[in-house]
Image (spheres, rainbow, N blue to C red):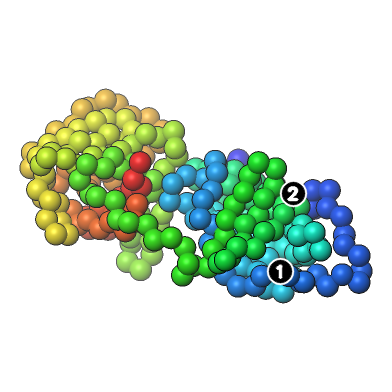
Amino acid sequence: MRLLLPALVLLLAGCGSEQPPDDFPPSAGLPSGDYVATVLPTPFALGDEVQLTLDGTQLTVRGTCNTLSGDVELDAEGVLTVDSVGGTEMGCPGNGFEQDDWLVDFLTSRPVLETLDAGFSLRSGDTTVQFLPPDASPAVDDAPLEGTRWRLTGVEERDGDAVGMTAVPRRTRAWLRIEDGDVRFDTGCNSGGGPVTVGVDRLRFGQVAITLVGCLGDGARLEAPQVDVLMHRSAMWTVDGDQLRLSRGPTTLLYTAE
């Protein structure tokens, strides 16, 4: 198990990187500014985001888990060299660590940078990731609340001004679906459902029933907040792109459209 060491700097050597000639301007042709990755491969999931900032000879990447930074150079052939990568090491549930490892491997593999009309792409082997300025990223239409299968991806708990977030492991297949005045859900351990009325910003539940299988581990830990929201009279809802939030009191369930 990894220790939670906030702000611990990790020095990770570039993978077989070669230094450009001393007389080569390190930032020649290198775009600067803030960018967002538009499509990400596994181990990233739908709804995950990677932000990248280029500033002179420095690169900073903010993933779903940690923030990484390093020295960056672009040679005359368009090969990007990222070296002396470091970052915070925060405890990250789910695929956070795997995503960090993927980013380090990809960025230190000497990818080829190709300039686009807006932003650029990085290509390494068979993998190409496109980065666009935040205001140029394609808009994501709101997924319809009804008829969509929503996968539980996180649980947010508020205690006064403090907010705690629990990520849901992908192996915990908790989901929710609302259709034709009916709600069906699976907590990752038990399943349930019942009548529901969809309002402008509120769901009003009827008599919701649930199975009573004993839950262990993640199933038990994640079931309680789902029951707290889904098996009471009402809950507030909002949809932003492919993200659904269901809230009751201090508890918010975070879902992603499948």
Residue 80 x %, y %: 75, 59
Marks 2 and 1: in contact by CB < 8 Å? no
Q: Can you identify the residue that label 2 sits on?
A: 109
Q: Which is more N-terminal, label 2 or label 1?
A: 1
Q: Can you identify the residue that label 1 sits on?
A: 30
Name the amino acid, label 2: Ser
Q: In the rendered picture of this protein, how many numbered marks are placed on residues?
A: 2
Residue at the extreme front of the image, as rendered: 117
Question: What secondary structure is marked by label 1?
Answer: loop
Residue in the picture at 22% in, 56% down: 237
Residue in the picture at 91% in, 72% down: 23
Q: Nearer the viewer, mark 1 or mark 2?
A: 1
- Neighbor class of circle 2 (other Cα within 10 Å; few <14, some 14-19, many 20+) is many
Q: Where's the C terminus, which quadrant? A: top left
Residue 212 x %, y %: 22, 27
172 shown above or below 72 = above
